[in-house]
Image: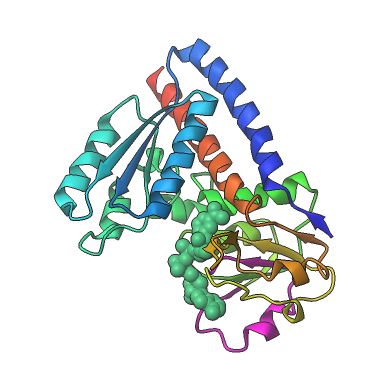
Amino acid sequence: MQLLDGKTLSKKIEIIVADEVKNFKKATNSVPGLAVVLVGQDPASAAYVNMKKKACDRVGFYSVTHEMPEDISQETIENTISMMNDNPSIDGILIQLPLPSQIDETKILELVAPSKDVDGFHPFNVGRLTTGLDGFVPCTPLGVMELFKEYNIDIKGKNCVVVGASNIVGKPMASLLLNADATVEICHIHTDNLKKHTLDADILLVGVGVINLITEDMIKSDAIVIDIGINRADNGKLVGDVDFANVSEKCSYITPVPGGVGPMTIAMLLRNTLKAAKAHAKERV
Ligand code: NAD
């Protein structure tokens, strides 16, 4: 079994992005800018935002976080987004999800200018992804594809089973795999007999949020296992959705949690923001 080491690859990508930021600065006299909207006090969301901010600092981006109280109104968030859409120092806008229940999340995500939608959640970019056109792709599944590239894992024609069908993980993951000529199956909470499906997988990708959902008897020998889940175990440690100790004995490749897909997500956010900045700079000349 070989580990798919997202921690090391993300550092390599950060070095490349930091270098490109230096060139960008020389050429445009500006740096890429990322704005984050963080609503409420959820510690996990605050921790993710903090990690993203630190990554921006490391590569030389400008970044700003708009922290808002849990009882914020729809109108205030919308006004903030409109302001960021119009601000030329901001190339990427990220709305940290989930938003509180009084907020219409779809409306908020639809308000982000597609050219600043570095999370790839706007229907414009979702449509471009499903039709195989260039656009912004959600960072987590994009990071998984980057791991495949780094380890020369050929996806074409492989049976890929994606467990989890959310708009931010499972569905875009499936689209990317399909665009790369894999045979793709998507499973979710209503899937009957999950094991029957997972046993078919050459490549199993799991983003659900349930500790030990995937056990060793659910994978075939030498499968490639991508664990996207992030869960806090009773002992306080971060774990994925896969029973790592036993599954890692049977598979050919596996992503660890932490240190697998998580750091790749942040690296892809940096890359998407740089891509947005380059496109905006081109528009300005
Ligand atoms: P979500 O709650 O929006 O979606 C969960 C999906 O899993 C749904 O499609 C649901 O139908 C499915 N599901 C739930 N229980 C299931 C079961 N028992 N069997 C099969 N399918 C089941 O969650 P999300 O936002 O997509 O996140 C999923 C996981 O990925 C979470 O653990 C989250 O923390 C993690 N995540 C990790 C990263 C990263 O950077 N590594 C990024 C985003 C999310």
Residue 281 is drawn in which quadrant?
A: top left
Measured from the top left, where is residue 149 in percent x and y?
Answer: 73, 47
Q: How many numbered badges does the structure rendering display?
A: 0
Q: Is residue 192 magenta?
A: yes
Residue 70, image x and y in percent? 23, 54
Residue 131 in sight: no
The quadrant of the picture occupied by the N terminus is bottom right
| Residue drawn where x is 68% and y is 83% of the image | 195
Residue 231, x across and y down, in percent: 53, 64
- Residue at the outermost front position: 235
143, 137: nearer the viewer: 143
| Observer able to see residue 8 | yes
In the image, 32 versus 14, the foreground residue is 14
Locate residue 69 relative to residue 162 in the image: left or right.
Answer: left
Question: What's the coloring here?
Answer: rainbow
Q: Note whether 4 is above or below 244 in the view shown.
A: above
Picture coordinates of residue 23, whole percent (x, y): 56, 16
Q: Is residue 42 left or right of residue 54?
A: left
Q: Quadrant of the C terminus?
A: top left
Residue at left offset 40%, top offset 43%? 117
- Most extreme residue toward the bottom is 192
Residue 192 lies in what quarter of the image? bottom right
Rendered view: 140 above or below 36? below
Q: Which residues are magenta?
A: 186-208
- Above or below residue 126? Residue 21 is above
Please state if 194 lies on the left or on the right of 89 as rendered. Answer: right
Q: Residue at x 52, y 68 (%)?
A: 209
Q: Magenta stretch: residue 102 in it?
A: no
Residue at point 70%, 57% (across, down):
255
Nearest the eye: 204 or 176? 204
